[in-house]
Amino acid sequence: MKIKLGALQLFAASWLCFCASSLSAQSDTLPAVSLSANVDLMSRFIWRGLENGHAPSIQPCVSASLKGFTLGAWGAYKLTGEGGQETDFYLSKTIGFVTIAIWDYWSFNDTSAFDFFNYREETTAHVLEAQVLLSGGETVPFNFIAAYFFYGADTSKSIYLEPQYFHKLGTADFVAFAGYQLKGTYYAPKAAFVNIGCTVKKSIPVTDRFSLPLSVSLILNPSSKSVYLVAGITL
């Protein structure tokens, strides 16, 4: 299967331009488009049980939402040293408790030549993923994620599944998760649990008007026999 992409990135730029013009045109009414942006500072970039970059990471993101559709960009960049970096784009649609998304993950090494627009399956560094999120919302404290790499650098076409459990602990939010590779070799050499752990999130008051969101995650990858304790703040 050979496809040539790049349209997702072009569409992303067009969507964000449309969002800006919509907000300007609707100054006398409630805006139809919702814009969001934030930056996470993480002690390590751990994703689905895999360590990326081996250094502290700054992770900016921006998104625009309209009528249940969200188009966004997310990145992870090392704060020290050279090496692996990441820039991703996604398009999602939420219908009730179901969110369907297409992700374009692009990893690159800033110490060597790279081509963002290379989507040839034999040589691309992009991985395209189809993702489904089932959310229990406020009434059922569970989420379930199913993700499938259908094109790109992961030729094994890996499938990843992750149930999540949410609980309120006083003023903190608690999330437990268990990620399992059902098929493929992207996360582990064979089918295995690769991302088991929990995250605690809490806002730390700094002034009367400003609080700093803090998160701490304990992550175990049974397949690689690795354990990580990761801290992060959101700006």
Image (cartoon, rainbow, N blue to C red):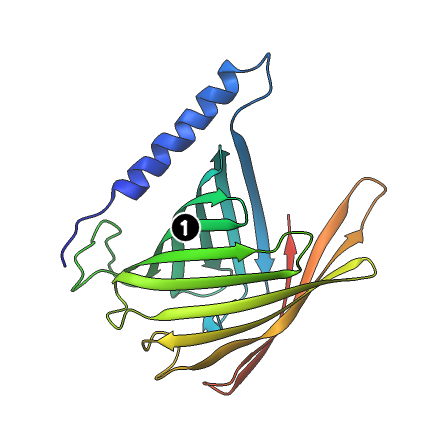
Q: Is residue 164 left or right of residue 53?
A: right
Nearest the eye: 55 or 121: 121
Residue in the picture at 60% in, 20% down = 30
Q: Is residue 115 left or right of residue 44?
A: left
The residue wearing badge 1 is 101
Where residue 204 sits: x, y (%)? 78, 54
Report the amino acid beneath label 1: Ala
Give residue 54's position: percent from left, percent from top.
Answer: 48, 72
Which residue is drawn at the image coordinates 35% and 30% (left, top)? 14
Q: Position of residue 8 (x, y in %)?
A: 30, 43
Residue placed at 73% from the left, 51% from the top? 212
Which residue, as the protein is rendered here, is positioned at the far right?
208
Badge count: 1
Q: Quadrant of residue 229?
A: bottom right
The residue tagged with tag 1: helix, strand or loop?
strand
The residue located at (18%, 61%) in the rendering is: 121
Residue 53 screen position, x and y as percent: 45, 68
